[in-house]
Amino acid sequence: MTDLTLLLRLLLATTCGVAIGAERQYRSRTAGLRTNALVTTGAAIFVLVGVQADVPTATIQITAYVVSGVGFLGGGVILRQGFSIQGLNTAATLWCSAAIGAQAATGHTLIAIAATILVLGVHVILRPLGHILDKDPGAKDEDIVQYLIHVTAAHRQEARIRAHVLHVLAQGPAAVRGLNSTLVPPTDTNPHPDSVELTFDVLIEGDARTLLDPLVAGLFLDHAVHAVSWNCESTTDPDLTTP
């Protein structure tokens, strides 16, 4: 096999990666133009080593290693934020890009081009279809919403109160994103000296009242707690805010 043929296969792999990456870059995804182009090019280079070796099993073995390597690369772009997982489509696209690069390197031009068109079609055509098939966001009970829980308590009991709130939240569909502690000086509304205000930034899935109302009721019975309130940060609906 001539070097020109290998070069053409390599250029085909890169071109397919550029086509996929351009669509990803346009949508501001984590893996864009350069990443997908490099994945297809890199996969093709490795597979071409097996082609150049002219050993019957070399191409298959190297392709298997490429698949494993891209698996680690794809895992690096998957992120978990609270209840949501981001990057799955990006990881799957990188996986497809590597496969397309391998197809181009082994001389399967038609399959490589067809696979590129299919990947682009999945992103362009199935995206709006997915939104159509998805349930109405307003009808979902499992929406994830941000809440702030404010607890004013005696400073000497801060550690105990904080541990209690975190324990209760851990029993329900909640994820604590942040916790802030601020000393509160005595005022007309808060005559207690040596007080501290704890603010919990929480993501809650589903009906928050089933989790927050019992928490607030229990804290009001605690002699060290001076005030408790919670409010929804993701909506302006007054029904989702307590005084």
Image (cartoon, rainbow, N blue to C red):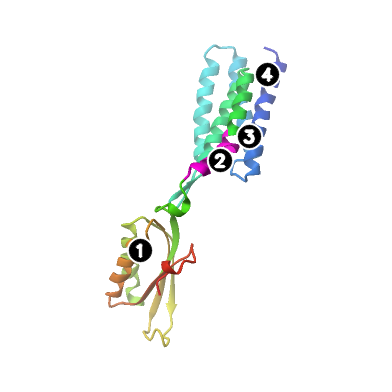
Residue 15 placed where, x, y %? 68, 29
- x, y percent for residue 185: 43, 83
Q: Is residue 29 left or right of residue 139?
A: right
Circle 2 residue = 127
User: Is residue 169 highlighted in magenta?
Assistant: no
Query: Residue at the spot x=62%, y=37% of the render?
Result: 35
Q: CA distance from mark 1 to mark 3?
A: 45 Å
Q: Of the two numbered discs 1 and 3 on the same chain, state the one appearing first in sequence.
A: 3
Q: Which residue is mark 4?
A: 6
What whole-number distance in Å separates the C-alpha atoms at marks 2 and 4?
Answer: 35 Å
Secondary structure, mark 2, is helix
Q: Secondary structure at mark 1?
A: helix
Instruction: Where is residue 197? Give x, y as percent.
Output: 41, 74
State which quadrant residue 51 falls in.
Answer: top right
Crowding at mark 2 (Cα within 10 Å: few <14, some 14-19, many 20+)? few
Viewer-side label of 4, 1: 1
The span from disc 3 to disc 2 (Cα, nearest Å) is: 15 Å
Label 1 close to label 3 by CB (< 8 Å): no
Residue ID for mark 3: 20
Residue underneath mark 1: 209
Q: Amino acid at mark 2?
A: Arg
The kind of residue on which mark 1 rests is Arg
- Three-letter code for the amino acid on which mark 4 is drawn: Leu
Dot 4: what SS? helix
The residue stretch that appears in magenta? 122-134
